[in-house]
Amino acid sequence: MAETRWMTINMGPQHPATHGVLRLVLELDGEIIVKAIPHIGHLHRGVEKLAENRTYHQVIPLTDRLDYTNAMGNNLAYVLAVEKLLGIEVPKRAQYLRVMMAELQRIAAHLIWLGTHVLDIGATTPIFYTFREREEVLRIFEEVAGGRLTPTYLRIGGVAKDLPEGIDEKIRDFVKVFPQRINEYETLLTQNIIWLKRTKEVGVISKEDAINWGVTGPTLRGSGVKWDVRKAFPYSSYDEFEFDIPVGTVGDVYDRYIVRLREMEWSNSIVRQALDRLPKGPILADDPRVVLPNKEMVLTDIASLIRQFKIVSEGFKPPKGEVYASVEAAKGELGFYIISDGSNRPFRLRIRPPSFLNLGALPRMIEGSLIADVISTIGSIDIVLGEIDR
Amino acid sequence: MSDLYLAVNRLKEKFPDSILEVVTFRGEITAKVTKKDIYEICQFLYSDPELQYHMLTDLCGVDYFPETPRFEIVYLLHSFKLNHRLRLKIRINEGESVSSVESIWKAANWLEREVYDLFGIKFENHPDLRRILLWDGYEGHPLRKDFPVEGPDFDKPYVPEV
């Protein structure tokens, strides 16, 4: 009588298909996964602790580095929380610019996901196409904000600067061709028999389980829950845009793939709507306590110079209280919970990371399936370790 | 307005002695509740057919050092039915432990591990209470207010000699 044993296999943290420094310990019965234990924290930088020792303005660059594929969305979640705490109203033009940038960023983030996810499964071609389009988005960011990966474009009360001359033509060009590009990806994948075999009925999570595990974003919608923060708790004028929430039915890898593709189309449409209806007006709130003065004024007017100096060195003091603001980031619901004690630094800044909770449900998705499906499942929940470990 | 306070009013009916205070700030409702009833309160909010707080959006700790009770645990619940968020808070002293809500929401599994890791708060009946972001054997809990932000490494990971 042969002895039956489970085999323990270590996967990561240095593994190309774990999308960062994720380590998985897998217990196997032959090729079947009996137990999966994720180990995280290799990228822990203590962002929440660091934020407690910075003024409110100084926290913005830290947020870029959470989910580094979705910097604009992270900025947006943080500034919304601070603005809610302060109770200030952001001008319409700034709100539209924020929406436009957040949606372009969503497209860029989903393009990275698509390229790398498909590459993990073995198709080398699509990554060259998706990175071609992502490059166009990053070039737009570079012109608008000066940065590509970590633009730090948003400010408390508005955005850093207005659109540069001639950029709307470039955005329009991108928006015009992008739907055809999605078609190109689809011709490579959607009906591809190998792709279907690797993704259909793989990594399934039911509606009830997904909610219970706190899963959000495309992963939740792939399981058929029609829920999106942009619709449920509209922020930054999202209620003025027309878009739909794509949902899946089964909750497998394929459904999440379809959901993200449709989401890119809607994001593209939102960018076009924002560009068409971009209101004129200021890009920063009129609140001298919080908002930095115009650079020209700083150089010519002593009062503005003093104000600039005070805001940069001391910051501002919001009222005592606590707020939670969240956005639909590329990965799911990204929330910032700020407790203010009335001083110029946040007393506690809690980040609600979508990838953290989505990854928490990974064992639920892969236990009982084949080891080869781990790769496609990790790819399909689209994790970024910078955000999980913070 | 009454709709917003539906959950809080139901809670007050059901647990008249456990709701200490209800605060509304910027349209967000926070209920401070007693520590001993937190599990029952969560269970009720989850299973009540009118409320159905089926999602635990967030769970985090706060350190109010040097106040007593020192720590606070914040639960942020979300109901798809009401499209509403409700925040619950409990205060606990150093060294005390809290009932885990993992058996209600699986999401609490990792969230409670994180609170344990960064604040050193223990959760009763948690199936797998280990450190999550820091390595096993790390000394100290970084999000406590008396933990320094800067300084020399006092706890290096153990590297065996070759």
Image (cartoon, coloured by chain):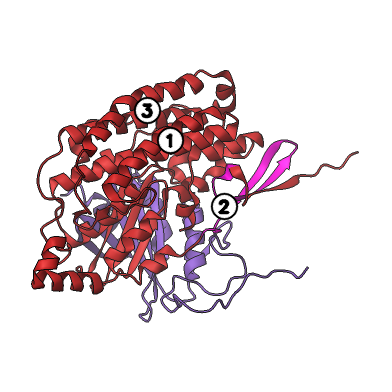
Tell which of B37 and A148 is nearer to you. A148
Give me the C-alpha separation between circle 1 and circle 2: 20 Å
Picture disc at residue A262: 3
Q: Position of residue A364 (x, y in %)?
A: 56, 42
Front position among marks 1 and 2: 1
Chain that is red in the image? A
Point out the stretch of residues depicted in magenta: A17-43
Q: Residue at x 21, y 49 (%)?
A: B4
Circle 1 is placed at which residue position? A111
Q: Which quadrant of the rendered structure holds the N terminus of chain A? A: top right
**Where does the image place residue A233, in percent across and percent down from the top left?**
25, 44
Farthest residue toward the bottom?
B66
- Residue name at image x 20 percent, y 35 percent: A275
What's under tag 3, amino acid-wise?
Arg
Q: Judge the density around disc 3: few (<14), some (14-19), many (≥20) Cα neighbours within 10 Å.
A: some
Does the stretch in magenta take in A36?
A: yes
| Depth check, front residue: B81 or A297 | A297
Q: How far across and down, in percent of the image, does residue A291 sit? A: 17, 62
- Label 2 resides on the chain identified as A
